[in-house]
Amino acid sequence: MLGFGAVRLRTDMNRLLSLLFHQGVLDEQFLQLQQLQDQTSPNFVSEVVTIYFHESEKQLRNLRNLVLDRETWDYCKLGIHLNQLMGSSSSIGAKRVYESIRSA
């Protein structure tokens, strides 16, 4: 049984997630991630999102370096990094990030 603090935390988290869905930040793919979390992997979503943040940071750093190197812009590498970021964003339900890249 959850203590009062845990219940409150879960309620707050559900409110935040609801807001993020309503604002279009997350989509149904995130719900599918949540459904994969169970007793055997209680931190699954947290671990996947943490990996996403770390990998996205690398992709953004690579993109920044490519863009700043104006003498030798490599459009192929830019496309590869953008596609990787778009794909990982789509796979975790980061709808707004995915749509921002797709519309760029």
Image (spheres, helix red, strand yellow):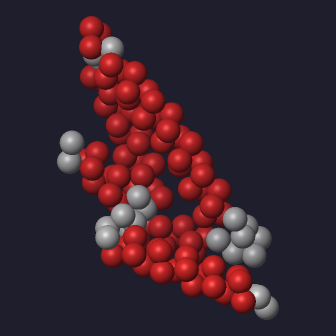
Q: Does residue 77 show up?
A: no
Counting labels gives 0
Frontmost residue, 27 versus 24: 24
**Residue 36 x/y as whole percent:** 61, 70
- For the C terminus, which image quadrant? top left
Dividing the picture into quarters, in which one does residue 4 lie? bottom right
Residue 93 shows in this picture = yes
| Image coordinates for residue 64, horizontal then vertical, percent | 38, 27
Between 20 and 35, the residue placed more toward the observer is: 20
Residue 84, position as x, y percentages in the image? 42, 40
Q: Is residue 96 above or below residue 19?
A: above
Residue 29: image x %, image y %? Answer: 44, 66
Quadrant location of the N terminus?
bottom right
Q: Residue at x 32, y 70 (%)?
A: 23
Which residue lies at the image location 65% right of the left edge and 71% below the top edge?
37
In the displayed structure, 37 sits above or below 100; it is below
Residue at 29% across, 45% down? 101
